[in-house]
Amino acid sequence: MIQFTSDLLSDNEKKVLVIGKFAGGKKNRDLYQWMEEAFDVPVSDWLQTYQHWGNEGEWHSLPVYKKESSVKFIYVIGLGREKHSSATAYFNVGKTLSRLSKHERLHYTAVYWPTFINDHSKEVELELFEVMLKGSYSCLDETSWRTEISFVLNEESDGKGFQEQLAETSYLSEMLKKNQQLLELPYELMDETKLLEVFKRLSSYENVHSDIFDHEDLHALGMGGILASAAKTNTSPSLVKLDYNPGKLEKDGAGFFLIGAGRITKEVEYIRNNQGQTQRVYTDRVGALLALSIFEQIAKKKLPIKLSILCPLTFDKSAEAIEMVRLMNEEIIQSEDSVGQLKMKLSDCVSFAKQEKADTVITLGTFLKDLHFEIGGGYQIALTNDPKLEYLRMKSNDSFEQKWWFLPFKRNGHPVGRQLKEVVSLGDTAGHMTWLHIDVFYTRLNKSKDPNHYRLQEEVDVILANLNWINQGY
């Protein structure tokens, strides 16, 4: 049993929010027992949250919980099945932390409990911890059961400067490298010079300032609670920050964040020696770079932009930089579904955004059917070619004010059906910004005859920016 001190909790900290994928079993019962002993908090007092993957890959969202101002939440995250992504839960944690931090000066403590020692996404999970949590947290590495690793990332902690604290996190990088060697997980990091080559056109505009940062600079940039997708891969997260500060926004110092880690992910089936085998193919298209085609249009109108892309960005071996450039130049983005092909140009999406006159930032993202990527709040709009999803048109969450709208797509790629008539302003909770998440996703193909494997839909990630000046004719 791992020993853990209970002094993390002060007298008024008697609530524990448990976020993770818990499917039962002896390991998790041991975890509950350990938590109960360590924190001196009975199970009945926990604010338990289960994020569980069913046998068919269903996704169960976080339930609403009551936020009590007198309680400092302790996030205990148990994640990481060998064949499933843990990213969804981390996005929800990041969203929760981000929302809470807008209202209160809370300090967070989290415990990382890897469910499987051979989890292929452990590196990502640990890195996401470093990115998301602005308080202190402890990381329990199952490879050394009794080792407690603590990182302090609170700028007010012990009087240490922020850079000093960042320096202390170097041990995390060493641990990640060690885990990488142990797990022998192959991955490629995109060379910075190659990314700069992609940036060359955008950087030619004098009113655009673009930077490339290593993901370790996230904290120094104050982006702790905002993430891009690193789902279903063992890659590092990428993030795009768009600062747009004209008029009152410049006075308020508010900026806009455009998030995207565009990814084409598909699962290819093949038969070898009369045995069903599944080969996963992950090809990173980095939606952050897709967004550059939008930014370039903004730059042509001489609107002030500060664009920051955090890397390393990762690519599959088959992905070439020239393909990224083609996508940036509004090449048709294609995605196979069970009945045909859906084609959509970025220009068509921008036209739709203009037509709806939404005062928003829009991200248009595509994810596996069993994965949803949520950041921020407001309206989240799913454009889908499956009319059967209409019954899911809207669902709300009193805590996050989440609302989903599903708009069916015609075969020619133009949206029809329910129109956007409202925009939710989050005000101070999101820096005078509204998020629209448009997810283009498709129904899972029928299972193959072999029940041991199935084929997932290839999906494409596209990003739109639709700011409050989009109707001024840029």
Image (tube, helix red, strand yellow):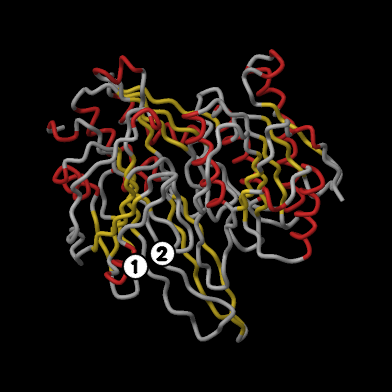
Work out which quarter of the rendered image holds the C terminus and state it. top left
Residue under the point 16% across and 45% down: 356
Query: Crowdedness of circle 2 by 10 Å Cα count: few (<14), some, many (20+)?
Result: many
Residue under the point 26% across and 55% down: 332
Task: Identify the image quadrant of residue 215.
Answer: top right
Q: Which residue is mark 1?
A: 336
Is 428 on the left or on the right of 469, as rendered?
A: right
Residue under the point 12% across and 33% down: 473
Q: Which residue is mark 2?
A: 458
Is 180 on the left or on the right of 148, as rendered?
A: left
> Of the residues shown, which amino acid type is indicated by label 2?
Glu
Residue 210 in the image, given as x and y percentages of width and height: 39, 25
> Of the residues shown, which amino acid type is indicated by label 1?
Glu
Query: Crowdedness of circle 1 by 10 Å Cα count: few (<14), some, many (20+)?
Result: some
Q: Are marks 2 and 1 in contact (CB under 8 Å)?
A: yes
User: Is 464 above or below relative to 162?
Assistant: below
Q: How many marks?
A: 2
Circle 1 SS class: strand
The front one of 452 and 373 is 373
Residue 170 in the image, given as x and y percentages of width and height: 71, 29
The front one of 440 and 159 is 159
Circle 2 SS class: loop
User: Is 131 above or below relative to 183?
Assistant: above
User: Is 375 above or below relative to 410?
Assistant: above
Residue 253 in the image, given as x and y percentages of width and height: 36, 18
Q: CA distance from mark 2 to mark 1?
A: 6 Å
Is 63 on the left or on the right of 327, as rendered?
A: right
